[in-house]
Image (spheres, coloured by chain):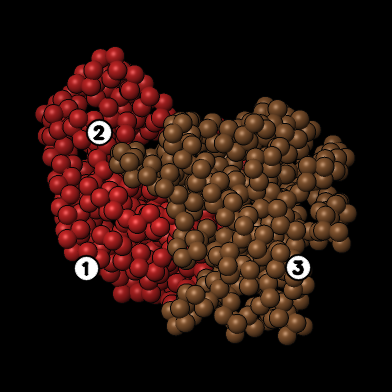
Chain colours: A red, B brown
């Protein structure tokens, strides 16, 4: 379309919602053939073995018992005070970094990622990101004219690919003074991979080395799946981010979507960690300005739920129990998948936690099409297939690897 | 602060939250002196005579009875289909314009304003806006580097100031090819003013005249208070926007915050009206891209509430009754204020509906300070004082004009 009333920078083809499309096809297949016959690996929310979305009782009882006045009223623009401080504790657990920490309420984890891309980069600067990634990162880069640069996520030994990361970082810094490194870890979406603590030391060494005067390196930790990423020790790595140079900053996108099964409540926060107090404050001010300029304030009920649960030992215990129950459910499903993948010789990427496990393969879209013939509906990305442990029962996790292996062999 | 890791374009001083500050002072005064003794005109939500926020039963019963799965789940990125179509009907009533109409879910009215500023302007383009305005417009212009140009809202006869509007429009179009005109009407925040239907004809004539080839004029109708702006006929003006030239476009920011007393649920939509179908679709695509790049999707419960109420005749009736009851409450409060303003010789701007009425005065901040001594807490802006009919009981609306008149006389 030529010049018209829509500004050129804002013109985009209609967002293809591949996941929505295949999910719709799957629903139709289920209607036709029955739920038992179909494997639905298209969803990104926790689903029980009967195909229903899991919504924690501890969370939704808290909402149902909330005074309607507290749901109706506005929250503070930057987020309510209690929410912001309790969320910091909740995110870090006992591993709070020893730096200057600020938090700001955002519309889910998405909002936190958006703020980070916006405030820490100029147009033309690079966001560097592994080649297995959440597609919204790319949409955000497009929206604000940031460059999106991918590097090979894992090396041949299935370790984080430090060499490729370094190359991408150096490339970006050669061209520009600012760069932002996205890490979706622990429990990466879409792979389930977690960067190890010792690897973090190596990554941070390299970032420290490259952060010479005049260069600015931002680290975004998207920890959307962190509560499903282990029994607590997965949070230990946070301690490493407190005392980096002041031309390095860390932002943590913390989402209530998965951790509270509160996807639809659009609540989360961006946690800022800097060794320099003035910079931490200044970034907070920048993000508060963005809040006012975009959504004014976030869902009050979401903030209240976190506060109500964190402040009440009984509720906190119920919530922790539910979370643990479903974390273990995911673990069982993952074990069932991985064991059977080994049996049939299907290669899957190392899984440490979270909602997904990935299968690298060529012609992933064709494989995904082929799998529909076998009544499995699965999301394909550039590098392979994303299997939704969050959405498929343990029984079906057992039989899925064979179906996937067959489809890959038939296509490739 | 000099160059640091925060990009220059994103550096802002901490947003001064004047309203929050004075509201806090008022709370302290109430604690000390008792609610009866203090007039709290600092709030922007509907408050009953006992000082409690009003949260419609019809809305919050619907929420309390909602299946938790429907609260927990994600909505569609562009908004759920039913929500988008029912919201169009709800907004326009029987006065749907005869053009190509699209709607897209946004985080409250704020989100819709943001999308409009973003998609229809380039950096350096002008947003033109009356000098009595909602301050967030300015914050949004700052965020995205749009120029914010004010003109005198009303002429000497308290009519919309067509001459000053035209001057601002011509100024902007002389400098740039794109301009966006914000109209917060009917029931303007902060004045309560409504642009008349015959004045709309004049405004649209001028816009049509200035929309020569190569120039693009966007109209933003922020109708946040429309459901409290009359008994229905206030929506008639919408019909005028269906068949404008294709280099003119209309966006309507519809918010559930006030109309459903659902401030904290951050739900609303941007309704696009164009005479050209391709342009309407293209702007929808642009805004869908923005949704994904900012907040992903909006509060699912908010969308569900609108759908549940609109689809159920009984609920719809209960909701309509509540809305009418509180609209009339506001009318009574306004009448009490205006009648007593006349008695004491206090000039207030013409009020047609909504949450606020305004008093033009010099040294408004000093007057607001002086009023604290009289136990009245009121928000000052550049042009005068904003009296919150939404938050002050009818009895207190009666005595307020005298207090304000005295304070103005004492200061000026």
Instruction: Verify CB contact (< 8 Å) between mark 2 and mark 3.
Output: no
* Quadrant for the N terminus of chain A in the image: top right
Residue B304 seen in the current view: yes
Question: Callout 1: helix, strand or loop?
Answer: loop
Q: Bin the neighbour count of mark 1 within 10 Å (Cα to Cα): few under 14, some 14-19, many 20 and up.
A: some
**Do marks 3 and 1 share a chain?**
no
Residue A364 left/right relative to A4: left
Image disc number at residue A52:
2
**Point 82% across, 45% down: residue:** B199
**Other residues around mark 2 within 10 Å, as few (<14) / some (14–19) / many (≥20):** few
Q: Secondary structure at mark 2?
A: loop
Determine the residue positioned at 88% across, 54% down.
B163
Q: Is residue A251 left or right of residue B89?
A: left
Task: Same chain for labels 2 and 3? Say yes or no.
Answer: no
Query: In front: mark 3 or mark 1?
Result: 3
Q: Which residue is under mark 3?
A: B342
Residue B177 spot, x, y in % from top left: 80, 46
Which quadrant does the C terminus of chain A fall into? top left
Disc 3 is placed on an element classified as helix
Q: Which residue is mark 1?
A: A94
Residue at image point 59% right, 41% down: B270
């Amino acid at each position: 379309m030529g010049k018209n009333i829509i500004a050129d920078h804002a013109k985009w083809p209609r967002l293809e919602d591949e996941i929505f499309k295949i999910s719709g096809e799957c629903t139709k297949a289920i209607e036709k053939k029955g739920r038992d016959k179909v494997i639905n690996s298209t969803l990104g929310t926790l689903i029980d073995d009967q195909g229903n979305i899991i919504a924690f009782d501890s969370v939704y009882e808290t909402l149902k018992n909330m005074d309607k006045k507290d749901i109706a009223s506005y929250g503070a623009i930057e987020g309510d005070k209690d929410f912001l401080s309790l969320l910091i504790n909740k995110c870090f657990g006992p591993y709070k970094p020893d730096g200057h920490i600020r938090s700001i309420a955002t519309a889910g984890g998405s909002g936190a990622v958006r703020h980070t891309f916006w405030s820490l980069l100029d147009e033309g600067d690079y966001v560097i990101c592994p080649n297995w990634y959440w597609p919204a990162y790319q949409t955000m880069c497009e929206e604000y004219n940031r460059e999106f640069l991918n590097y090979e996520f894992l090396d041949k030994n299935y370790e984080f690919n430090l060499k490729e990361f370094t190359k991408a970082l150096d490339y970006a810094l050669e061209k520009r003074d600012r760069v932002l490194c996205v890490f979706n870890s622990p429990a990466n979406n879409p792979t389930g991979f977690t960067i190890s603590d010792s690897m973090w030391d190596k990554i941070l060494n390299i970032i420290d080395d490259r952060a010479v005067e005049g260069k600015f390196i931002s680290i975004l930790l998207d920890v959307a799946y962190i509560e499903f990423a282990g029994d607590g020790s997965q949070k230990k790595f946070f301690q490493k981010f407190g005392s980096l140079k002041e031309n390095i900053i860390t932002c943590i996108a913390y989402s209530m979507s998965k951790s509270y099964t509160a996807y639809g409540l659009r609540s989360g926060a961006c946690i800022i960690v800097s060794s320099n107090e003035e910079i931490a404050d200044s970034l907070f001010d920048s993000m508060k300005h963005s809040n006012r300029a975009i959504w004014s304030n976030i869902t009050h009920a979401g903030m209240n739920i976190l506060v109500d649960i964190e402040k009440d030992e009984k509720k906190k215990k119920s919530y922790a129990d539910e979370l643990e129950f479903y974390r273990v459910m995911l673990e069982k499903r993952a074990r069932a998948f991985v064991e059977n993948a080994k049996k049939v010789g299907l290669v899957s990427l190392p899984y440490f936690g979270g909602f997904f496990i990935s299968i690298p393969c060529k012609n992933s879209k064709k494989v995904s099409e082929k799998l529909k013939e076998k009544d499995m509906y699965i999301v394909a990305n550039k590098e392979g297939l994303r299997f939704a442990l969050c959405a498929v029962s343990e029984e079906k996790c057992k039989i899925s690897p064979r179906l996937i292996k067959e489809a890959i062999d038939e296509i490739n």
